Image (cartoon, helix red, strand yellow):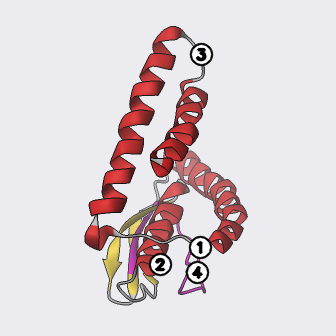
Amino acid sequence: MAQWSVSWLLLFPLYLLLAGQVSGEEVVAGILIAAVAASSGVLVSRFGGRFAFRFRLGWIRLVPQVAGQLATDLFRVGRVLVAALAGRPQSAGIVRQPFEPGDPTPVHAARRGLVELGVSFAPNGLALGIAPGTLLVHRLAPQPIAADREWPL
């Protein structure tokens, strides 16, 4: 019950923040959506089996890197859009980013998920999947390959 309560207490205000207003309808919707999301999280954590994840607190250090990538990618994508409007479209493509997916453990599963989320968060990249030793990424604009094979953000 504690996991559900903590999840709900975090998700409800997040919903209201993202809704952009606090009205009666949004409060009711937030209560229901937070309850469904918290219940889903509890069910997955208890009965997920092979879908177990273990996050490390030290991974929070990557947030500034992802935020910086967001700013850089906004500039890159802006250049591509301006070039396309000027009649000089650039070709997008799929890049094979070297990546060490790790063992099939909950910690490595969480890291793989965060890498795919981090790569896809910035507007220039969309993680398509993981192949042996490779993260497949669709890039709108050319970008250097990340040197870090563990966290190629």
Q: Decide: is 35 above or below 60.
A: above
The residue singled out by tag 3 in the image is 22
Among the two numbered marks 4 and 1 on one chain, the one whose residue lies closer to the N terminus: 1
Residue 86 seen in the figure: no
Among the two numbered marks 4 and 2 on one chain, the one whose residue lies closer to the N terminus: 2
In what quadrant of the picture does the C terminus appear?
bottom right
The residue singled out by tag 4 in the image is 146
Quote the CA–CA distance across marks 3 and 1: 34 Å
Residue at (39% x, 84% y) in the render: 134
The kind of secondary structure the magenta stretch mainly shows is loop
Quote the CA–CA distance across marks 1 and 2: 8 Å
Q: Nearer the viewer, residue 15 or 77?
A: 15
Looking at numbered disc 4 in the image, what kind of residue is underneath it?
A: Ala
Tag 4 and tag 2, C-beta contact below 8 Å:
no
Looking at numbered disc 3 in the image, what kind of residue is underneath it?
A: Val
Among the two numbered marks 3 and 2 on one chain, the one whose residue lies closer to the N terminus: 3
The residue singled out by tag 2 in the image is 107
Q: Decide: is 127 above or below 42.
A: below
Dot in front, 4 or 2: 2
Looking at numbered disc 1 in the image, what kind of residue is underneath it?
A: Arg
